[in-house]
Amino acid sequence: ISGTIVGVCEKSIMMPNRNINKGDYLVGLPSTGLHTNGYSLARKVLLEEYDVHDYVDDLGMSVGESLLAIHKSYLPVLNTVLDEKWLVGISHITGGGIVENTMRILGKDQKLDIDWQSWERPAIFSLIQRLGNVPENDLRHSMNLGIGMILIIKPDGFSDLKSHLASQGESYIQLGTVN
């Protein structure tokens, strides 16, 4: 089974055209698992140690259930704030991880200042790292590490975003800033 989504957007309203500035906030929305990144590495590491039916205490489920965790759609949570002027960028964290995906929408003179300790990673990422002896940088470049979407917002819009996310029952992590 395969699912595909295709979308169309007017170039004039695309997020990268909304003027991201140094000091803007990086706000992460949690993923529900691997989503679309790191499956080759995950399968290699996990299936050398376990069968897909094996229950793993660290995961709280079988290996197969963890690998098949649903890819969350963020549209229902974000749809009503897409036109807010304080929302200046959106980065969907797929292959390439947090840094590579988010750098695509920044200016050439900008970089990310991420507090990598600001959230607790889901257990599957720690398990893959430990079992496969995967270096931290490799993990960061191939997986979402529990962050499925990053919103870049103006600091003065942070309270509005927090209120909106609370009304949607959506948790968030303030990851850092654009520098």
Image: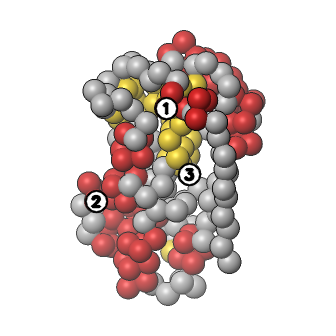
Disc 1/disc 3 C-alpha distance (Å) = 22 Å
Question: Image height check: is 48 above or below 113?
Answer: below
* Residue projecting furthest to the front: 11
Q: Earlier in the sequence, mark 1 or mark 3?
A: 1
At which x and y percent is residue 80? 74, 31
Question: Of the residues tagged 1 and 3, which is closer to the observer?
Answer: 1
Label 3 sits on residue: 31
Chosen colour scheme: secondary structure
* Distance Cα–Cα, label 1 vs label 2: 27 Å
Return the x and y of residue 146 as percentages of the image width and height.
49, 51
Question: Percent from the top left, x then y, of residue 32?
Answer: 59, 56
**Callout 1 secondary element:** helix
Tag 2 residue? 138
Indicate the secondary structure of the residue bearing disc 3: loop
Q: Residue furthest top?
A: 156
Q: Viewed as shown, does residue 154 lie left or right of 169?
A: left
Q: Quadrant of the rendered structure where residue 81 is? A: top right
Q: Earlier in the sequence, mark 3 or mark 2?
A: 3
Residue identified by numbered label 1: 16
Which amino acid does the dot numbered 2 rest on? Asp
21 above or below 52?
Answer: above
**Classed neighbour count for the residue bearing mark 3: other residues with Cα under 10 Å, few (<14), some (14–19), many (≥20):** many
